[in-house]
Amino acid sequence: MIVVVVVGVLALLAVVAYRRWVQSSYVAEAQDMVSNIRTAEEGFYAENGGYLDVSGCLGINCTYPLQKPGSSKTAWGGPCGWCTNPTTAWGGLTVHPNAPLIFGYAVIADKAIPMSSRVGAIKVNGKLIDVTSAPAGAPWYFVEADANVSGDSLHYMHVYGMAGNNQIWVDEEGN
């Protein structure tokens, strides 16, 4: 009887550890992709004098490769009919992940409208992100990654990055 209890406890600990490992790999995917998108935006800026507004909006209905990400992985590279410019879309940023993704990604950029007007108030773990760092009339971009790891279509994990600083924010990491 004691052996069965010990094996049960060890199995429970293994399952919890495995779930944490999977969760951290999802967060690592998003942080890596947001970083790659930021690098691609800076490269686009160096060549074109402005940032590329790929998605036109933020949120789960604006993300790519799936418009509404779920709990399964999706390959990168298909068409983006909901993007601002469907013909170039993500190809203009030359972002090429090496595996299917669980997160969906959205990027908005502008220079005529302040970042705070287009992005709005975004809270990360209860604290507002300061999106006023780009001066009026200066080019800026904002990256959002969303995933519904739990598959319940209610609770989304978010990862954010933007022009003007080197921070990446993770919100709702447990979802």
Image (cartoon, rainbow, N blue to C red):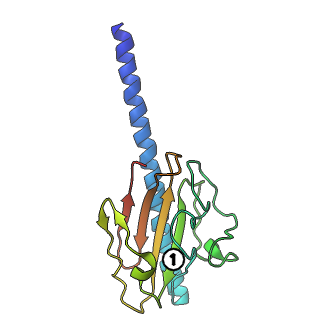
Q: Nearer the viewer, residue 153 or 158?
A: 153
Q: Residue at x 41, y 74 (%)?
A: 162
Q: Residue furthest top?
A: 1
In the shown orientation, is residue 166 left or right of residue 58? left
Amino acid carrying mark 1 in the image = Ile
Q: Nearer the viewer, residue 122 or 149?
A: 122
**Residue 143: percent from left, percent from top:** 47, 70
In the shown orientation, is residue 70 left or right of residue 160? right
Q: Residue 7 lies in what quarter of the image?
A: top left
Q: Residue at x 32, y 59 (%)?
A: 125
Q: Which residue is mark 1?
A: 108
Q: Residue furthest front?
A: 154
Q: Residue 86 lies in what quarter of the image?
A: bottom right
**Residue 128: percent from left, percent from top:** 31, 69
**Residue 98: percent from left, percent from top:** 59, 57
Q: Residue 14 lies in what quarter of the image?
A: top left
In the depicted structure, whether residue 158 falls above or below residue 20: below
In the depicted structure, whether residue 1 falls above or below residue 102: above
In the depicted structure, whether residue 49 falls above or below residue 8: below
Judged from the image, the secondary structure of the residue bearing numbered disc 1 is strand
